[in-house]
Structure formats: C-alpha cells, structure tokens
Image: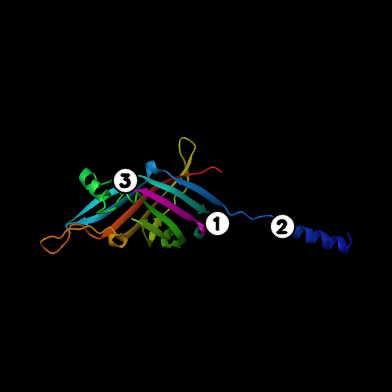
Amino acid sequence: MNKTIQNFVATAGLAVLFAVPIYASTSSWQIDSQHTAAQFSVRHLAISTVRGQFSSVKGTVQIDDTDVSKSTVDVSIDVNSVDTREPKRDAHLKSADFFDAAKYPEMVFKSKKVERAPGGRLKVTGDLTIRGITKEVILDVDGPTGAVKDPWGMQRAGLTATTKINRQDFGVKWNAPMDNGGVVVGDEISIVIDLEMTKQVK
C-alpha cells in the first residue's frame, strides 16, 4: 500500500470516528406516586410538632450513570393531597390562609445542579415553587439505591431527600398570636421525601 492510499485510509477512518455520536448512559425513571410521599413537620404553639404529608407526588428523574452532575429531577406535588389526619386542619391548609389550593393546585421542584456530597450522598439544588413564588432550595439526598426487579419485572430504585424551608418565603403567612407573645404555627418547615421510582423502557 503506497503512502497516498495509507493517508486516505487514515483520513477516512478519522472521519468515520468523529461522525459517530457518543451517547451518554442516561436512564429515565418515573416517580411511583403510590409508594412516594412528601412529609413535613412544623412546630405548634412552640410546644409540640404537627406532622403531615402530601401523598400525590409525580415526576421524572433522569440519571446520568457516567456523570451524576448531569442528572435532573422534575417533581410536582398535588396540594389537595395534604393529610395531617385532621380533616378540618387539612381544609384550612388548602384555603387561601395557607396553600390556596384553588389558585395554586401544585407545588413544583425543578433541579438546576446535582453534586456529590460526603458519605455517598448527593446535594440537589433547584427551584421550588409554592403559591406561585419560586425560591432556590437544596435537597440532601440519600440514594438513589441500586435497582431491584419487582415481581412484575419492573426495575425500581428509591431515595430519601430532606430540606428545611421558611414558609414565609413562599407567602404562606397565616398565624395567630398567643398570650405569651408566641404564635400558633412555626415558620420553619422540615421536609422529608421518601421516593420510589420505576425505570422507563426505551
């Protein structure tokens, strides 16, 4: 093979190599609302803690297996699914005093950045929207777990995310004063999301 042919073959080989797209190993996961809940807790009368949850959590998680920082999370929570085990309190939480579910039926979280944290955990920074007000929050994430196959052949994984927010930042302002100078409802809300998801088949 003369030099001209060798050069042609080498050039053609490089052209083919760079023409072939390199695909990242990304998997798409659907949140299983039946096995997922967004739980919250808040101080009541400064002496006890009231706990509740939103049972309708939907969305998708895109996991980049080669570079976790390129993963994304998109979650929506149905405000009307709030449950504190007290119907009158739930109705008050849905009213304009708190979440105003008639006007703002969903809370939404969209990730902007995913970082590795010590202990194999993740930090997920994103925009949380409540009552039409959007603020940046950081979720501390334990997981996702390794995938397992359920009895019906679906690949499943789970994770737990935690954060704290100030409800006043999102326009959830109702309160009532007490004789001792305190208030009925605390401002700091602790949030725990226990999430289960199923892998989507391409």
Q: CA distance from mark 1 to mark 3?
A: 38 Å
Look at the image and say whether residue 71 sits in the magenta stretch.
Answer: yes
Please state which of residues 10 and 57 is positioned toward the viewer in this rendering: 57
Residue at numbered disc 3: 80
Residue at numbered disc 2: 17
On the image, the x and y values in percent for residue 154 come to 48, 39
Q: Secondary structure at mark 3?
A: helix
- Crowding near pointer 3: few (<14 within 10 Å), some, many (20+)? many
Look at the image and say whether residue 73 sits in the magenta stretch.
Answer: yes
Residue at numbered disc 1: 66
Q: CA distance from mark 2 to mark 1?
A: 21 Å
Q: Earlier in the sequence, mark 2 or mark 3?
A: 2
Taking the spot 70% from the left edge, 59% from the top edge, the residue there is 18
- Crowding near pointer 1: few (<14 within 10 Å), some, many (20+)? few
Q: Residue furthest front?
A: 103
Is residue 86 visible to the viewer in this orientation of the structure? no
